[in-house]
Image (spheres, rainbow, N blue to C red):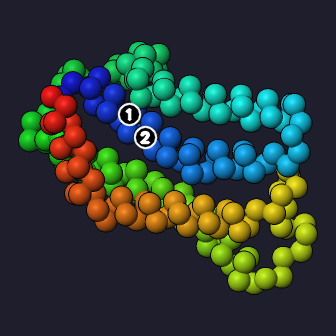
Amino acid sequence: MLIKDFFQLILKLFGLYFIVAVIFTVIPALLMSVQQVEFFTLLGVVLMIILLAAVFLLLIFKADVVIRILRLEKGFESPVLPLDNIDTYSVLKIGCVLVGGFLFVDNLAPMVSNGYQLLKGSLDRHFEETLFGRPNTQQDFALNSLNLLIGYLLVTNSHRFARWLNQDQSSNQ
């Protein structure tokens, strides 16, 4: 495997993680922040979604451009990584574990914190509202719990997801 191919794979896996995180956390938070339909607020939300979509498309479809701009190939003694015994299934399985692990780790602390706040039940108005003025504890707890569940399922069932993704790849060839 060439170093460029390895970095393309890493960037594409990060792009998949990025889109999952955006779909389940950022976009709902942006949409919930719009309390009143004002032009500049709506414009800001639309611009943010367009920016996030552009980053995703760049990571997935233009990974070679990112590698060239960041000069990720430089500094290696050999342009080839000795990964002869690693097959597609193993790479997909490792990718599922990494994405699931990132989802799990990123959402564990906020879920525990929001769960504690909900169980305590004595939130005053200051802690319950964010800068945008919306109560967020219940929604954040639900989103963090969903992300934890997805991350857990990706880690524990990585072999099934990898087999399914590998099957889709082999049927397209």
Q: Quadrant of the C terminus?
A: top left
Amino acid residing under circle 2: Leu
Residue located 71% across and 68% down the image: 138
Residue located 13% across and 41% down the image: 87
The residue singled out by tag 1 in the image is 12
Q: Vertically, is 20 above or below 84?
A: below
Count of numbered circles in the view: 2
Left or right of 42 in this view: 162: left
Circles 1 and 2: CB distance less than 8 Å? Answer: yes
Amino acid residing under circle 1: Lys
The crowding category of the residue bearing disc 1, from other C-alpha atoms within 10 Å (few below 14, some 14 to 19, many at least 20), is many
Instruction: Please tell me whether mark 1 sits on a helix, a strand or a loop.
Output: helix
Towards the viewer: 59 or 86: 59
Q: CA distance from mark 1 to mark 2?
A: 6 Å
The residue singled out by tag 2 in the image is 16
Seen as rendered, the residue at the extreme left is 85
Task: Pinpoint residue 28: horizontal percent, then vertical percent.
Answer: 66, 50
Instruction: Report whether residue 71 is seen.
Output: no
